[in-house]
Image (tube, helix red, strand yellow):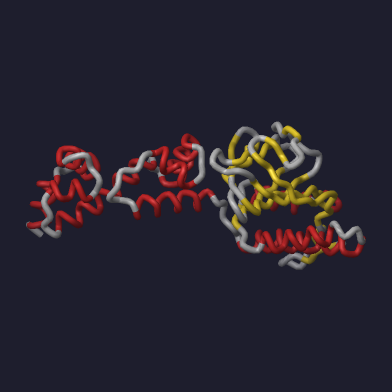
Amino acid sequence: MKYIDKNMNNIDLIKISGLSPLYRTGTRINVGSDVLPHRHSKMEMHLIMRGRGAMDVNGTPCPLEENDFIITFPEDVHNLKTAADCDYILQYMVFFELVNNNTELQAELRKHFKSAVKTDKGPEVFTEADRLWNSGQSHLRAAAELLLTSFIYELIGAGEAPPSNLYIRKAQAYMRNHVSERISLDKLSRHVGLEKSYFCRLFKEITGDSPMRYFMEQKIELAKEMISSGQRNLFIAEATGFADEFHFSRSFKKITGMSPRSYRFTEASR
């Protein structure tokens, strides 16, 4: 079977060899079999239906949550892990290969799906593909292959971005919404559902700042507005979650290069 791509070239369909929904709890998967880092001779699709965790691929964890889709490749040593505060993960897992081992399509899959992508359509598509594939009827199995091929090409065409940015945006939004509070790194990483050290590396990689530096900058931006409106330092320190006025002044100077008093004078002279 062939598929017509956007450039009107014939591209091979995927060929499914297995499709099933699987529960994973803790370090064990549905029927209690231990799952250690492993690899397969075929490619493997994963769609997370419920829960969250990470797919460890060649020693690098890729965070996963509901509606995330990722493909692992034959050379990938991988292992799906549930988050520490998550009871289970329900995923659809599909073993597949490419008809005629199409290298062009393989390259596209590696480009787009080595990291996870977010897809709202995934649950509906995989539920239907599951019904078709497990019907036992050859023509319905072919329909499942068509359905999943179309799904993959739609994701490629949409240029979906890895969900790493979604985790970072979630963290940033949380910090902006709680700028008047004191938030620990432990609390922040738990909020986004990532292991702390990995969250810090990911945040730094994407933003160029550490999470706590970003949070401090948000506090200082709010403090600047309050200074401009004539608020006193003690009130600002309390309103922005600093331990005391001295802590606020020291942090303000570290971020802006000037003391709150100097900043106040500069603003007043404009």
- How many discs appear? 0
Spot occupied by residue 74 in the image (x, y as percentages of width and height)? 76, 40
- Side of 252 where 264 appears, left or right: left
- Side of 138 where 5 appears, left or right: left
Spot occupied by residue 215 in the image (x, y as percentages of width and height)? 33, 46
Q: Quadrant of the N terminus?
A: bottom right
Q: Quadrant of the C terminus?
A: bottom left
Q: In the picture shown, does residue 197 fall above or below 230?
A: above
Q: In the picture shown, does residue 134 fall above or below 196?
A: below
Instruction: Work out whether residue 42 or residue 37 is closer to the camera in this orientation and state it.
Output: 37
| x 14%, y 60%: residue | 229
Instruction: Work out whether residue 132 or residue 34 is closer to the camera in this orientation and state it.
Output: 34
Spot occupied by residue 49 in the image (x, y as percentages of width and height)? 65, 54
- Side of 113 where 195 appears, left or right: left
Spot occupied by residue 133 in the image (x, y as percentages of width and height)? 84, 58
Task: Determine which quarter of the picture holds residue 184.
Answer: top left
| x 69%, y 48%: residue | 71
| x 67%, y 37%: residue | 79
